[in-house]
Image: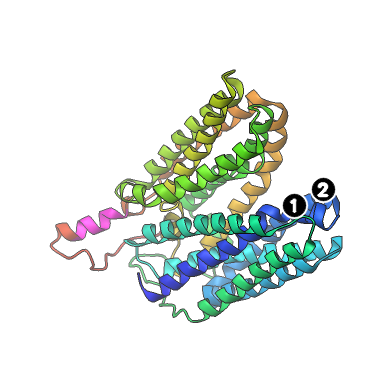
């Protein structure tokens, strides 16, 4: 791992640590501490999604034209301003404007950092780089939330102001770290089609990328979009899960990711990406069946709680398998110089899924317990179907990058020699 990649990973960890300080407590802060009510708090959470949807279509082109680092620095400054303003805001207008700035900055960070990882890695190291990113993000979020929970006091607004100040400081520290990163030139890949203006029309003409985007929407809708809304509501209403057990389930999800991430990496790297994603769909189908038993199985409360915690752990296992698979595949599908555009497009798909997921899953989980489980069980099986279909659109090396290394060895070369691969669809 080069110096640039180490700094990028430190940046990922710091940004996640800062977000972990505030995200779990945002609703309580707006609704109770500032006394603005649940309606305003709900709108603030929606503003985060709206801000992301507004800026992401422009972020990709900016990354292509200016490079990922300047775009990242601008996003970090914007997020720092939004975080500090949110900690000081005491009216609905200032809270909403601050949330918009923070949400926009956070949204642009994702594709900018992902593009920096792409530019600082090779096809052989990319899966491990993205796995490390995901590992550090979850670790940072978990530690940030744990420490933040011991700092906040709903009777003292100043304790929340301190949290947002720490978050802003993390973003500004990240500005200084990222300013020292020396970015290599974007790797040139033999046979890759050149970008023509970075247009969305060209991206939509890439059938493999379009299919991956559809698959990505289903992935985020059926899993991440349910974590803090539908699935938790189902656990409380159908399975009688206590708030402490819900916290244990969240911790089990994070623990599974932290423990399993590098354990599954070698397994994932040697398999076809489409088959790995298909396997995740089956694992998540088992997770939804386990959740169904927790709420509809008429077992003891202890068994229901154990099943519900296991559901979150199974989702974590699937996430650990996806992190070194999906993001590197997005990068490998991008033509030369277009990684920023493709990363931004995929981030946009993710935000759409995260906006729609809670809106659909929340009300259904609270009142229609059986249909909720069946619906998302079918979505998980749909992931498997879409993954198998996507595999037919990928070249052998796109689907299994380890083939490039094995071909070099078969030809009498060394594994460190550059291997020409095609990244077009």
* Residue ID for mark 2: 38
Tell me the SS state at disc 2: helix
Q: How dense is the environment of label 2, judged by Cα within 10 Å: few (below 14), some, or many (20 and up)?
A: some
Q: Is residue 322 shown above or below 182?
A: above
- Which mark, residue 335? none
Q: Are marks 1 and 2 in contact (CB under 8 Å)?
A: yes
Q: Is residue 243 magenta?
A: no
Q: How dense is the environment of label 1, judged by Cα within 10 Å: few (below 14), some, or many (20 and up)?
A: some
244 horizontally vs 124: left or right: right
Q: Position of residue 208 (x, y in %)?
A: 46, 50
Q: Position of residue 58 (x, y in %)?
A: 64, 67
Question: Which span is picked out in magenta?
Answer: 401-408
Residue occupying image coordinates x 41% and y 51%: 325
Q: Main secondary structure of the magenta part?
A: helix
Quadrant occupied by the N terminus: bottom left
Q: Is residue 413 shown above or below 353?
A: below
Residue occupying image coordinates x 60% and y 58%: 147
* Residue ID for mark 1: 27
Q: Is residue 405 magenta?
A: yes
């Amino acid at each position: 791992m080069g110096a640039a990649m180490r700094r990028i990973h430190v940046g990922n960890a710091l940004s996640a640590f800062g977000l972990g300080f505030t995200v779990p407590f945002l609703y309580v802060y707006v609704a109770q501490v500032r006394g603005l009510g649940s309606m305003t708090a709900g709108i603030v959470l929606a503003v985060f999604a709206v801000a992301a949807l507004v800026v992401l279509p422009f972020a990709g082109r900016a990354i292509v034209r200016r490079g990922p680092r300047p775009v990242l620095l601008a996003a970090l400054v914007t997020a720092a301003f939004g975080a500090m303003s949110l900690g000081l805001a005491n009216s609905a207008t200032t809270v909403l404007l601050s949330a918009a700035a923070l949400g926009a900055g956070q949204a642009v960070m994702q594709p900018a950092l992902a593009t920096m990882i792409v530019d600082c890695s090779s096809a052989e190291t990319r899966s491990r780089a993205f796995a490390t990113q995901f590992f550090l993000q979850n670790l940072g979020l978990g530690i940030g939330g744990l420490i933040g929970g011991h700092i906040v006091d709903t009777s003292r607004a100043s304790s929340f102001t301190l949290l947002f100040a720490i978050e802003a400081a993390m973003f500004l520290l990240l500005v200084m770290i990222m300013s020292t990163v020396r970015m290599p030139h974007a790797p040139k890949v033999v046979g890759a089609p050149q970008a023509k203006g970075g247009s969305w029309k060209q991206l939509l003409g890439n059938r493999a990328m379009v299919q991956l985007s559809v698959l990505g929407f289903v992935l985020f809708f059926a899993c991440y979009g349910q974590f803090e809304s539908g699935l938790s509501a189902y656990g409380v209403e159908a399975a009688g899960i206590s708030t402490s057990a819900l916290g244990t389930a969240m911790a089990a999800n994070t623990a599974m990711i932290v423990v399993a991430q590098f354990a599954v990496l070698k397994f994932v790297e040697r398999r076809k990406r489409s088959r790995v994603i298909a396997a995740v769909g089956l694992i998540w189908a088992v997770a939804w069946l386990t959740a169904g038993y927790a709420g509809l199985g008429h077992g003891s409360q202890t068994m229901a709680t154990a099943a519900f915690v296991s559901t979150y752990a199974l989702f974590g296992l699937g996430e650990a398998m996806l992190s070194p698979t999906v993001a590197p595949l997005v990068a490998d599908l991008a033509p030369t110089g277009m990684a920023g555009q493709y990363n931004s497009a995929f981030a946009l798909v993710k935000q759409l899924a995260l906006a729609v997921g809670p809106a659909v899953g929340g009300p259904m989980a609270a009142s229609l317990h059986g249909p909720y489980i069946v619906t998302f069980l079918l979505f998980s099986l749909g992931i498997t179907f879409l993954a198998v279909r996507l595999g037919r659109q990928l070249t052998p090396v796109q689907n299994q990058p380890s083939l490039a290394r094995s071909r070099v060895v078969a030809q009498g070369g060394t594994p460190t020699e550059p291997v020409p691969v095609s990244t077009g669809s």
